[in-house]
């Protein structure tokens, strides 16, 4: 369903490379079009709590076909989707999750990265996405 | 308990019609007076994460006999029901869930809609309720 | 992903008809190829505990692309898949869940029925599948 | 903690190779000495329900430092660990999970494989372990 293991691995490897370049320890997850875990890598010494966050970020992206950070803007107090994080067994809505698009502009999967600041998480996720463009 | 399958299906069909008219892809759930899922429809291509949200909206309505959006006003930081979303296995308190009333003004069920903006979710839920009035 | 709402509704309606013919009160769920709930109906007065079972049966079928009853034979004490029910948030492995196949023999969805004996659950599920053949 | 990402990936790659050789579609998970997911791969078209099972097998191994199948012998009705599967959020105790040992005979991680018969799951897991010996 959507992204293949080959492509998912390619995105994970590109994200790992970016993380090493930035001297970061990351957890990186890629899900397919069905929001099913397809490829995952945890760098040595990366935060233990970030395994779950990386996977949830990737799943959250695919649940609503948008970057996690976009959803997080709408889920703030007073925002239209306040506390949407309580759905689907727990969402993560801060940056670090990005959609992976197919040739026809459809969402074929998603990448989630966790282990550093949200800016770094986002940058590493972006490197993963860019590898498939 | 409360709404029949026949009436619940009628509400779902009216909501589907409204969604198509507005060119939206929705998940629509109706629960009975016991907050038990009675009828559900997921339009082709609707957000994956909205299945759970539509059902939770309908259940949240019946848990407190008020529209989800009303509860969401009271659950904001500083509000009287701050973070009530943590109860009952996870509530959804933004708009898109509405009570279905019986002939004597009692709540006989609820409808929850998810798949677009909260304004659209609300409009489609309203169409479902109106079909039974 | 796989079965459309139109086809899913068709299967549910055929199952409902069969249930009425047999004078049974059933919960009927259809999931798509991604194991996502697509259509659901709960007959008036059907067992409350069967809502969850019908949905789990449909999901279990798609998780392993086989009838729930087949999986249940392998999950018995001493069997090769003993206690597989503990995976995926809880499986149901007794009869009443059947795959829905597409034109090329691929699984495009699944139906789960619960509310009576497993023989009756199976018969009603079969009526749903047959409507799409 | 224990196995590195480099070694975990090596085990996953060897397991993938074995799975392709046997013409099987597998989900393969490696956890470290802390039972934390370290590397994961899902082959295209593998059973959806086996993602969770592969990860649970790997974790179950490390929880008790023995192959999943050994634990499953003790968890049968009348056995000393009857229904131990209810612990730790859900264990999987049939074959397909194996410990990965370090140079001094200590457990440094575990591999879990799911997607076929338990014999095949076990054979593929064994190929992963052997690659690190």
Image: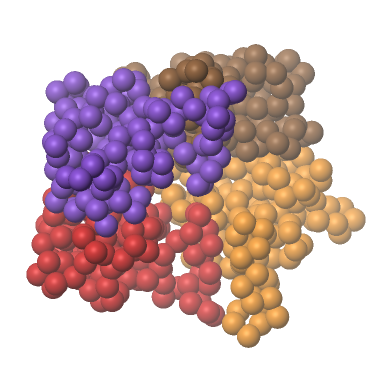
Chain colours: A brown, B purple, C red, D orange
Residue C79 point in image, percent of width and height: 51, 77
Image height check: is D50 above or below A48? below
Q: Nearer the viewer, residue C14 or C130?
A: C14
Residue A78 point in image, percent of width and height: 50, 18
Q: Quadrant of residue C29?
A: bottom left
Q: Residue furthest right?
A: D104
Image height check: is C52 above or below C94? above
| Total tally of numbered discs in the picture | 0
Q: Residue furthest front?
A: B104
Residue A42 point in image, percent of width and height: 69, 35
Q: Quadrant of residue C6?
A: top left
Residue found at x 45% / y 61%: C91
Residue D72 point in image, percent of width and height: 63, 72
Residue found at x 69% / y 76%: D81
Image height check: is C32 above or below B47? below
Residue B108 visible within the image: yes
Q: Is residue C78 left or right of residue D7?
A: left
């Amino acid at each position: 369903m959507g992204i293949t293991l080959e492509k998912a691995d390619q995105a994970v490897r590109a994200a790992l490379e970016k993380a090493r370049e930035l001297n970061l320890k990351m957890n990186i997850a890629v899900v397919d079009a069905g929001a099913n875990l397809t490829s995952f890598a945890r760098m040595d010494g990366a935060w233990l709590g970030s395994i779950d966050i990386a996977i949830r970020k990737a799943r959250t992206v695919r649940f609503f076909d948008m970057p996690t950070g976009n959803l997080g803007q709408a889920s703030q107090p007073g925002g239209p989707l306040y506390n949407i994080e309580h759905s689907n067994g727990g969402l993560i809505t801060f940056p670090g999750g990005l959609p992976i698009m197919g040739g026809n502009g459809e969402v074929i999967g998603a990448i989630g990265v966790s282990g550093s600041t949200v800016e770094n998480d986002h940058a590493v996720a972006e490197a993963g996405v860019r590898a498939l463009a």
